[in-house]
Image (cartoon, rainbow, N blue to C red):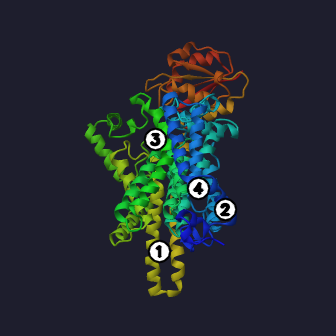
Amino acid sequence: MRPPASSLNLHEYAFAGTRATLCSGLGVLGGNTAREGGYGVRSQLLARFRPRYGLALGLAFGLAALVVYDVSGYGHGMLFLWLAALVTLGIYFWSRSAVLPRIAKIDVALPAGLTLAFIPLYMVGLYRWPVQVSSDEIAVMSTAREYASKAGVDPFGISTYLGRPSGLFVLWGKLADALGGVDLNNVRLVHGAFGLLTIAASYALFRQLLPRGWALFATAFLGFNHAFFMISRLAMRENTAVFLEVTALALLLWGLRRDHPLATFAGGIVAGLGFYVYIPGRAIFPLWVLFLILLAFLSRERFPLRKLAQLGAIALAGFALMAGPVMIAESKIPPETTPQKDALLIYQAGRDLQHEWVPGSSEAGAIAKNIKWGLTAFNNNLPDHQYIYDNRGHGFVDPLTGYLLWIGVGVVVLGLYVGRRDLASLLALGSFVFLWLSFAFVVNKAPAYPRMLIILPFVAYLVAVAVRSLAGFAAFVARELRPALEPYVPIATAVTAIGAIAVWNLAIGWDYVQQGRRSGDPIGSTGRYVASHKNIPGEGFYVAADDTRSYAYFVWGNVEFSYGRIQLFAKDNSQFRGVVSPAGLVNFEAPPPFAIFMRREAWTIGALALADRYPQGRLRNITPDGSLVVLEVPS
């Protein structure tokens, strides 16, 4: 028999009794939340593990780990303290949390099925489509290959690539090695897999904000966005920020709604992981802080300040423990190499880059253009100004999404005006407005598609709200005109809307693929040629180029970048034999077999001499228009 509630403290009573049935965003959760097995484990844990001591011990371990890392750097001692802090605090918050309620099976099956359905879009033909290979893909692959084989890497530290954290490059390299090696196909495969994981994880967030059907709609919308799935098909790391964003917010929101410290602590940890991936992932925790502030002002009757402060402190503990080491590492690098300075207009480096990037204008004029292009990013057809996914003639979202987005914003604002201050509205609208204005007024080079990917989950929610409102209006009209059709109108509206969005975005993505097939790509076409010839015994590769406009082989970067862009596709580093000046082609000699890549203008300089010296040589086009060619000389 259980003792009466009066003889137990509130925490113990939470695990001793049953709770009323809860209708939550993840289905009906109820009955006895303290299942028999969980109750026994918890009882033993609470008897042996003093909660207040656990909190103090965990915080002490965490602080000690950060101090040791700051003073002595990475080592086994620091790692032990850091892991001890994670485990101790995790056990403490677990002991203070209710057993997780059962999740409806359909809420597991739906995102799993939808993710499987998206596999062809994200994973099929990655090596061939798109043809385009950006210089950033080469940098990511090269750094991942370096750190996959490097001994004694500090996972919390800074890499050799623009001062970015090394942890993700270690992960990327190890995963690609497990698939067969760090090459274009395998790194694109890893990135595509994280795109699929993002789709699955986003449902856990949307299901807490929307009814089941509309959560599925928002998840499908995110998966079909052309910028998201096309960038996920590149050998990059950009979608990692979105994956951590939806995962962290799903955990944090779960913890807030159910007063669940462990979920909140885990959400803070995942938000801290945002500091190790693509730079926009660092916005995750500020978005959550903004949301808590909005709740404090607009929903204090439901969420008292004491509760918000407690859960905010728990999330902060997880965030600080995870993000602290990399923040310490970055504080020790030269100020000019700080990762975000050249991307933010609040720094002179960011303003200088914006001014340089918009030629023919003053600094103020360049910033004004950034603001204009950022504010209209959802309703213009400007391409990606980071030139990673340069799909000319199309904007960040399709035109239909651009209209539905603002309808959704209007519906949510109207709901807030009449007093409907639900969690979904405050989180989605607040985060959207914060990011939208930041990308216009604070972050340069707007619209920069890879950076803007983190706003897509909130766009998906607002579009779902818009279509849901339109479906409700259509159902009202049907009730007046054809009552028998009323039950089918919302489903028909949702299917029509997501179908139109899907077709439109697939067509936009296919335009990018076709663009590469028609025009080729300097890096992509050259790299694939190297990969197809690397197994010829004794084969060597040269580039005939210089840094002038007439003879530069690669558009981006100087001739020194030729090394990495050839070596990454070759069998080994020795196959790339070096750079030859175009003028030196007249006297060029090397033992066959070899291939020389050059612009056609460079070929005209040495054509006669090379033809006499290597009569067996053949000139082939690298790009379909013949602007880039290769002289291949067989053995």
Q: Position of residue 320 (x, y in %)?
A: 48, 44
Q: Earlier in the sequence, mark 2 or mark 3?
A: 2
Q: How far is mark 4 from mark 1, CA to CA? A: 42 Å
Q: Amino acid at mark 4?
A: Trp
Q: Quadrant of residue 624?
A: top right
For mark 3, what is the residue? Answer: 387
Q: Residue 481 in the image: x percent, y percent?
A: 45, 86
Residue beneath label 2, please? 38
Q: Are marks 3 and 1 in contact (CB under 8 Å)?
A: no
Rendered position, 496 above or below 267: below
Upstream in the sequence, badge 4 or badge 1? Answer: 4
Q: Nearer the viewer, residue 46 or 518?
A: 46
Q: In this figure, which residue is indicated by the disc labeled 1?
A: 471
Quarter where residue 526 is shown:
top right
Between disc 3 and disc 1, the foreground one is 1
Q: Which residue is mark 4?
A: 94
Work out whether residue 79 or residue 530 is closer to the camera in this orientation and state it.
Answer: 79
514 vs 451, left or right, is: right
- N-terminal-most mark, 3 or 1: 3
Circle 3 — which element? loop
Front of the two marks 2 and 3: 2
Q: Nearer the viewer, mark 2 or mark 1?
A: 2
Q: Label 1: how many residues lie within 10 Å, few (<14), some (14-19) or many (20+)? A: many
Q: Position of residue 346 (x, y in %)?
A: 32, 40
User: Which amino acid type corresponds to the residue marked 3 in the rendered image?
Assistant: Tyr
The amino acid marked with disc number 1 is: Ala
